[in-house]
Structure formats: structure tokens, C-alpha cells
Image (cartoon, rainbow, N blue to C red):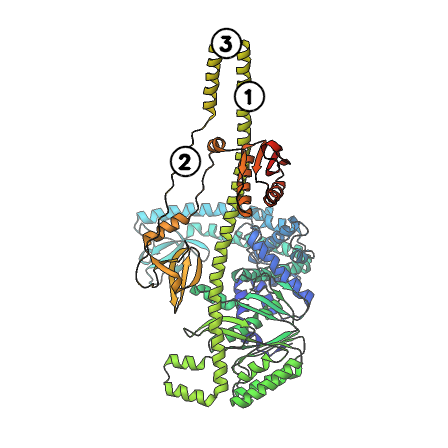
Amino acid sequence: MLYPHTIEQKLGFDKIREQLKEECISTLGQAFVDKLRFSNDFDMIQKLVGQTAEFKEILLHEGDFPSGNYIDANPHLNKAAIEGAFLSEEEFFDIKLSLQTIYACLQFFAKKDETAYPNLREFSQSVEVDVNLLKQLDRVFDNRGKLKDDASPELLSIRRQIISEQSNLRKKLDTILKSAKSQGYISDDVSLTVRGGRMVIPVSAEHKRRIKGFIHDESASGQTVFLEPAEVFDINNEITELGYKERREVVRILTELTNKLRPYVPALKKAYTFLGLMDFVRAKAKFAIRTEAINPVCVKQTLIDWINARHPLLMLSFQKQGKTVRPLTIKLDHKERILIISGPNAGGKSIALKTVGLTQYMYQCGMLVTMAEQSQIGLFKDIFIDIGDEQSLENDLSTYSSHLTNMKYFLKMADKYTLFLIDEFGTGTEPSVGGAIAESILEKLNQSKAFGVINTHYTNLKFFAEHTPGLVNGAMRFDSQHLEPLYQLEIGRPGSSFAFEIANKIGLPGEVIAAAKEKVGDKQVNFEKLLRELETEKRKLGTKNQELSVLQKSLNQTLKEYSELKGRLDTDKKKLMNQAKEEAKRLVKEANQKIEQTIRDIRKNKADKEETKQLRKELQTFDQSLKVEYVPEPTTEKEELQVEEGEIEVGNLVRIKGQNAVGEVLGIRGKDVEISIGALKSTVKLNRLEKISRKEYRAQVNENTPRMLGIDMNEKMANFSYQLDLRGKRGEEAMTALDEFMDDALMLGSPELRIVHGKGDGILRTLVRNQLRSYPQVASLADEHADRGGAGVTVVKMR
């Protein structure tokens, strides 16, 4: 049920119909646009919307669907159904073209997989077009819609005779024309022409009696007459007679074709219904593409859960102006059924209301709607609206009376399947009375379990919505700093009308505004003030959230880079360790071979002094070749940063006393200073900071920047000792030294190690051995021989 009867005009759906008609190719589709109706049948709506969604996919992704010759040939079929009637060449040509389009549509679906476009395919199941009929029409008519010469043997013979006679006629007339020109009866630029279906010669009026013949016409000035020479009179008569004969044959052929077409008329009418539906659904799909509309999830219940819904007509209008529509996100369910929207004038309340009404109406008319894919849309049995001024001079109704008349209908007919929309609820009468009546009506509507959206400025309705189950407040956001509407709906809190602020911006005298505040009373003013403060705090919180989001993104990126770098370092470390182990094994093997060879040579030479001396020299040279020169990295003593004198101000570069952290001053609030250290911001007490120069700042930043250092394996091998002395170290210090020692040992592949920790109370020994057991590379732990330290030394065997 819809109320009032002008609901389409009030919501703007009448303009949607006009847009759809413009998208239609033919009157067939336009007729279906006129039949478009609101429905609450779930299955029907799903089918209609599904058809539009499928055609949208065809337009976007298929290039071979017919898009021309959607011709309404129903009047021609009605004529053909009459016995004795025949269709003209033009009428047959319309039927031929449109049947080709229908056949192409059917072939499109026939060639697709059976699961493709099921809703549209259902249309084509009951439609048939006889291919033989199409072939016959194509054989008889040419591409201009005229009967071909060979449409029948008789027609071919007649037309050949006509061509022959016309050729003879032209030859004779050319001879007469040439003679007349030579005698000066007519000028040189005159040519043959036709009057009354007969070929004639234009002759000057003064010479008209010089040529024997018949005058058929004269020019407007009377200076020229159009004369048919007597010599060609019989030929013209013959051509005229052949023309009549041709016409009789054409009528005979058309009558015969019409008789053949007549049995197909009922089936063809179904085919043209199919063609009209294709045109209609195509128009809906094209409109959906223009408005970026989709087919949201539809649920068989009363529900509105829309994300980024937009008013389609406003969207199209804004597109022409290069602007964008602010989307509407709204949710109404069985817990919060009625939304009370408040906010300043011209803030977008009415647009939000009409967006809800028009979107719901369009969907239940089988159209796609403009919103995000994640949205859900329910169905309503009734849509009631109270929008605009309904004054009636005939019925003696004022604006407020008309509103109350609407409310009477709402209260009587609304139920849990109803969606109602009320713009400027309660206005048109004395505010206190209007507000009270509006609250009572709202209470009754809430009891009916109906769904609704209401726009209002009344504070009592905002309070009522705040404390009543089933109702929820909503506000059109407003920039209180610049006093400009943001056209965004925020559900969950009421909005302020910002009347005093807008009055002040316009320039209303201050004393007038102050007097108005006194008249309103502290309660109302404080309520409006609270709403403004909430709006301000929300804006600040939004800004902070954006900043935190940027910082979080930067932190995530840094963590990602760190993880990638650590992974690469771990991989490189393992690779270097393996290479070092292989190199160490190779060197040891080569050294052992050299020593064994030297011993064999000494024995072979029976310890000859000179030979032994020479062999020892070669062994020493080999030993020197294995050693790597170690060049210690130059160290520089760290210089103290130079501190500048003077007060710290915004923009200065500072350092935290006692630390290496440096940063830039962003703001000063009393004794608290906000500084940026790299990508982070922090608040520090003023007395903990000292000012530094930009040169010192750059030096400190560069010094604190970590640098990747390479590993000198030759240096490690040359300086590594298989024994570590931990005596005199504290537990934590000893464990750090032990871990560094084990890293080097593992990198160089040492088979055996000695850890000197002393005996004492045995605490350090226990710590050392527990730490060593955590290394999977350690094969065993044991005390050293009593002569070489005993329990004060741990011997480590590596795997």
C-alpha cells in the first residue's frame, strides 16, 4: 500500500520514469516503463532485479547483444490479421528488421551456457521465430525495404520492359532536345524533366508552338512550359501502362506475403512482447550503469542496512557539475526501527529522507540501487510519506491540517510491515503544542512496530528518542568552527540546529541573540551547547585518530622492513658460518698435509741438518701465508655536544639531557614541550631539554643511525683463542662474554673449547654449564685434568 497517491512525484520517481523512457530504443520498451509498479512480492522482486542485474552484466561484458531495430510492429500485425488486407513494403520492412533483432536476441541466449543469465533466458523460452519466414522476407525485400526485381517472374519481366521503354524514350527526347537547342527554342543549360509521371522538355513560352506536342505544366513565372513532344506520346503511354501493371503485380505479391504471414500473427505478438521487455530491462540496466547501482543482498524481512547509499538523481545532477554526493549509511532493524534526524537547516535532512524513500521504492519496483556491495535491503508492504506542503483550497486544509490528516492515516494503517517517512515533523502550528502532539504521534507509531525516518527540530523528540526503546537519534554533521554543513548522517546522537551560531554569522545584532537565549532558557541553551561541544570533541578525536593511523602505518612499515632485514642477516650469518667452517677445514687439512709431508721429507733425508733447515723454512713460509694481516679500525673519542644559550622556542632543535635523543620543538604549553624524535612525537618537561645547533643535530642524527658492518673472517681466525677466561666477572657480564665467544667458535668451527671460571662456590661454573647446555652444537662438558685446573675449568667438546 502506498500513501499518498502522489508518492512518486514527492519521492522523484516520476523523473526516474522519464530517464528510463529516454534510455528505451522503442515505444515497446516505453510502454513497459509506464507499467512499472511497486511490489511487495519477494520472489517477483528477486526476478525483476535479477533480470536487470544480468542485463547490466551483458552491457558491461558482452559486445554482441542486438542494440538496434527495436521496432513496434504490433499495428502491422493487427492489420495483417484482417482477411483481405495486405501490408505495404514499408510495413513488411519494419517486420523484417524487428524480427531479425528478435531472432538475434534468441540466438544470443541459445549460444550461452544454460546457467548464464537464467532470469533473462526464461523470457526466451516461450518465444519462437520461424527462420523460413525470415528467409522468405529476406529473399523478397532488398536492404532499402523495396521489393526485389526477382520477387516474381512477372515483376522481373515488367521492370525490364519499363527499363527498355525508358531507354528508347530518353534517346528520342535527347534527339528532339538537341534539335530544339540548335534552333534556339531553348537555352543550352536546359535538361529533360518529369511532369505527371511523363518525360517532358522545358521550352520557352514564346517557342511553345514551334514543337508539336502536349503542354503538361508551366513555371510559376509563366516563362517556361513543360512540353511532351508528340513523337514520344505513345512511348510515355506505354511506360505509364507498364507502371500500372507493375503496381498490380506488387499488390499481388504483398497480398500473397500477408496471407502467408497471417497464421504467424499470435506467435509474433509474443515475440514483440519479448522484444519490448528486452528494451525495457536494457533501459533499467543502462540507468543502473550511469548511477553505479548494484543488486544488494535482499532479505525476506523488514530491514534497512545500507552502506554508502546515494540519491540517484542527485548523483546524476552532481556528475554534470563535477561534484560528488555524500553517501548515506543507515541501519534500521527491530531494535532500532525509527530514526529521528535533527540538525541545522540546509544540512541534508530532507535529502537523507528522500534517499531512503526513493531507494526502497526503486528496489521494490525491480530496479538496481546505488549503495555498497556489503549492504542488505529488506522489503516493506507499505510506504507512507509526509513530505512537502499539502495545502488544499478545495478542502479548506491548512499546511498543519494536511499534516495531521496524513498522521491520522499513518496511525490507522501502519504496522510492522510499514515504512513511513515524515519531513519536518510537527511544524506548522504553535511549537509547544506541535511538539507535544508530535511526541504523542511518535509514541503511537513506535507501538505499531513500524519502521520510519523523521526529520525534526523539536528538542522534546530528541529526548524522547534517547530514552525510548525502538527509537534512535541521528544528526546531520555540521562544522561548528566554520558554520558549514557536512551533509553526513551520524546515527546515535541528536543534532543541534545551530540557530544562534548561524544568526551570529549572518550578522544579527548581539543583543537580539542574547535576548533570544534568555527567552529560550538555560536548559535549551545548555543542551545546544553540549551538542556543539560533542561535535567539536568528535572532530578533534577524528584528527587524532588520523594521526595515529599514519603513525601506525609508519610503524608497521618499519617493523616489516626490520623483519625482512633480520631475516636476510640471519641467512647471511648462516651462509658465512658455513663458508668459514669449510675454509677452516680446508686450511687445517692443507696444514696437516704440509706438516706430514715435511716430517716424511725429514725422515727420508735422515734428519740432514741443511735439508731439515730448508724444510723448516718452507713450513714457516707456508704458515705465514695462512696468516691474515689485521688492521684495527681507527677509533675516535666521542665529543661532547655543544649546547647553545637562550630560551627554547617552537622550531628549535633540542636534546634530552643525559641522553643521545635529539628532536625538534613542535609546541610549548606551559612547562610541557611537544617534540618530534624521528617519526615519533613526545611530550617532555622544559627543564629536561637543552638547545643545540643544527650542525650538532645533524651530527647526532648521523651518529645514531645504525650502519651495517661486514665480518672480517681472516681477522676472526687470526685473533680467536679456544680458551675464555671468565674469572672475576659478574654473572650477567660473564654470560654475555660467553655468548659472544660461542658465536665466534661456531662461526670458525672449533672442535674443542676451554672455559676458565674458577672454583670458588661453584656459582659461576653452574651458570656457565647451564648456558652451554642450551647450545645444540655442544656435544659434552667435562672438568679439565686436575693438573690443568680441574673443576675450575670446563672443557667443551663440539659436535
Using the image, tell me which numbered label, if any, was put on residue 608.
3
Spatial CA distance of label 3 from label 1 is 22 Å
Left or right of 573 in this view: 508: left
For the residue marked with disc 3, what is the amino acid? Answer: Asp
Mark 1 — residue? 592
* Vertical comparison of 400 with 377: above or below: below
Do labels 3 and 2 touch, CB within 8 Å?
Answer: no
Using the image, tell me which numbered label, if any, was put on residue 522.
none
- Pointer 3 or 1: first along the chain: 1
Instruction: Identify the image quadrant of residue 403.
Output: bottom right
**x 62%, y 74%: residue:** 336
In the rendered image, residue 521, in percent from the top left (x then y), is placed at 48, 88
Spatial CA distance of label 2 from label 1 is 30 Å
Depth check: give the residue in front, 550 or 758.
758
Circle 2 sits in a helix, a strand or a loop, which is it?
loop
For the residue marked with disc 2, what is the amino acid? Answer: Pro
Depth check: give the residue in front, 102 or 165.
102
- Pointer 2 or 1: first along the chain: 1
* Closer to viewer: mark 3 or mark 1: 3
In the rendered image, residue 360, in percent from the top left (x then y), is placed at 60, 70
Left or right of 127 in this view: 756: left
In the rendered image, residue 407, in percent from the top left (x then y), is placed at 60, 84
Quadrant for the C terminus in the image: top right
Mark 2 — residue? 632
Quadrant for the N terminus in the image: bottom right
Instruction: Determine if residue 279 is in view.
Output: yes
Circle 3 sits in a helix, a strand or a loop, which is it?
loop
